[in-house]
Amino acid sequence: MHPDPACFAQAVRRRAFGRALRITGVLDHGELAEHVDAPTTTSGQPDRARVASKVGRPT
């Protein structure tokens, strides 16, 4: 998963983390949500990972 809030939301809706980690029950994804929603850098420039994740996507 890349640090894209839409991707994170979709993974939560699909309960992908529990399946990927092979854990039953409810997972607390609060800290990961804070990380994904946090500003990418202090300089205002997007993080390279975020930019790279959009390369090759159809427009």
Image (cartoon, rainbow, N blue to C red):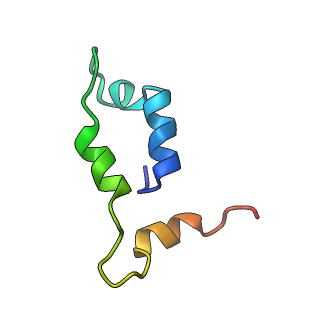
Residue 26 horizontal/vertical position (percent): 28, 19
Residue drawn at the location 38% of the way across and 24% of the way down: 19
Residue 25 horizontal/vertical position (percent): 27, 14
Residue drawn at the location 37% of the way across and 55% of the way down: 37
In this picture, residue 55 sits left or right of residue 7: right
Q: Is residue 23 above or below residue 29?
A: above
Q: Is residue 47 above or below residue 19?
A: below
In this view, the residue in front, 40 or 49, is 40
In this view, the residue in front, 11 or 39, is 39
Identity of the residue furthest to the bottom in this view: 43
Quarter of the C terminus within the rendering: bottom right
In this picture, residue 6 sits left or right of residue 55: left
Residue 47 horizontal/vertical position (percent): 40, 74
Residue drawn at the location 67% of the way across and 62% of the way down: 57
Residue 56 sits in quarter? bottom right
Q: How many labels sit on residues?
A: 0
Q: Is residue 12 above or below residue 49?
A: above
Q: Is residue 10 above or below residue 37?
A: above
Residue 5 horizontal/vertical position (percent): 46, 51
Identity of the residue furthest to the right in this view: 59
Residue drawn at the location 43% of the way across and 55% of the way down: 2
In this view, the residue in front, 57 or 45, is 45
